[in-house]
Amino acid sequence: MLHAYVQQCDFLAVFDADFQPEPDFLMRTIPYLARNPQIALVQARWEFVNPNECLMTRIQKMTLDYHFKVEQEAGSSTFAFFGFNGTAGVWRISAIKEAGGWDDRTTVEDMDLAVRAGLKGWKFVYVGDVKVKSELPSNLKAYRRQQHRWTCGAANLFRKMGAEILLTKEVSLWWKLYLLYSFFLVRKVVAHVVPFVLYCVVIPFSVLIPEIKIPAWGVVYIPTAITVLYAVRNPSSIHFIPFWILFENVMSFHRTKATFIGLLELGSVNEWVVTEKLGSASNTKPVPQILERPRCRFWDR
């Protein structure tokens, strides 16, 4: 953005290092920005080169498919707003500048920019039929750190921008309600804390202490409905649902911890660890490197 030639440009395409856009990517995204001056961002969908590498990547694909098909598409079609995914998108440079530019005050600077641009009245478009290939983390430690960064950063951004969203006069009351309640409170806080409290605390206690009674709708009906909504996007992976439930319950502990770190701004709130990608699914073989064998700690085991 600081190079001189950027002054002659109107749009900025953003990709992470492991993303592989098709040759016609710009031809399929730029027209939205060129024809409608109110649009600030065109977000493409992620596609994955290694979804079948292991059970963990299959589970990630199920979760991310739901995110794009339901959360991103719903936000785009109803309020013309959703969180920028940080990659596989094209921004209008004037919108970035009007929103105040990139800000690294949280670990979700992409979401931060999207919220600030939304508060200025800019609109976003999600284009689900434009897909960009990328790699899913296949290492549990890498995935856990990625989830910590995403969850902690979003909760921290909620803390920093809650009052600003409430007091702004440039957007409607319904838009503010959607952003504060649905986008932040429900999806960035409640969605992590409730599964952990219910499945990892309340239900185990009800097994150990018979006096604790939980209604069937809370244990069976609602969780089943939510699980089916996730699974319906991936009918070929429906037999992985039991593993998905167990895995997400484990991750709910890490996400709940990250949520409170972000809300309370505790020690590791701005911890940034780049997600490890192996490049094993690309067409080119990685250059072998001589690395020291890391010392294996008992805590890691």
Image (cartoon, rainbow, N blue to C red):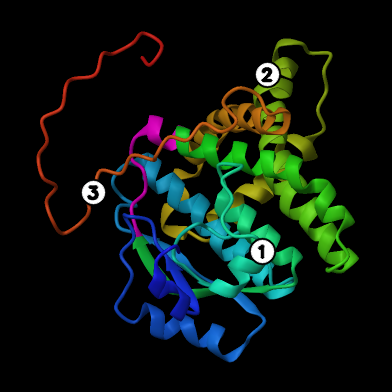
Residue 55 shows up from this direction: yes
Q: Nearer the viewer, mark 2 or mark 3?
A: 3
The three-letter amino acid code for the residue at tag 1 is: Ala
Front position in the image: 276 or 71:
276
Label 3: few (<14), some (14–19) or many (≥20) C-alpha neighbours in 10 Å: some
The three-letter amino acid code for the residue at tag 3 is: Gly
Query: Residue 99 has which mark?
Result: 1
Q: Nearer the viewer, mark 3 or mark 1?
A: 1
Q: Quadrant of the N terminus?
A: bottom left
The residue shown at (84%, 47%) is 163
| Label located before the other in sequence (2 or 3) | 2
| x then y, percent, for residue 300 | 38, 16
Q: What is the CA distance from the residue labelled 3 to the residue labelled 1?
A: 35 Å
Q: Is residue 151 above or below residue 129?
A: above
| x then y, percent, for residue 218 | 77, 37
Q: Quadrant of the C terminus?
A: top left
Q: Which residues are magenta?
A: 134-144
Residue 140 position by quadrant: top left
Q: Which residue is mark 2?
A: 204
| Label located before the other in sequence (3 or 1) | 1
Q: Is residue 142 magenta?
A: yes
The residue shown at (12%, 36%) is 289
Residue 199 position by quadrant: top right
Q: Is residue 272 above or below residue 205?
A: below
| Circles 2 and 3 in contact, beta carbons < 8 Å | no
Left or right: residue 30 versus residue 154 is: left
The residue shown at (52%, 50%) is 63
Front position in the image: 191 or 222:
191
Label 2: few (<14), some (14–19) or many (≥20) C-alpha neighbours in 10 Å: few
Query: Residue 279 has which mark?
Result: 3
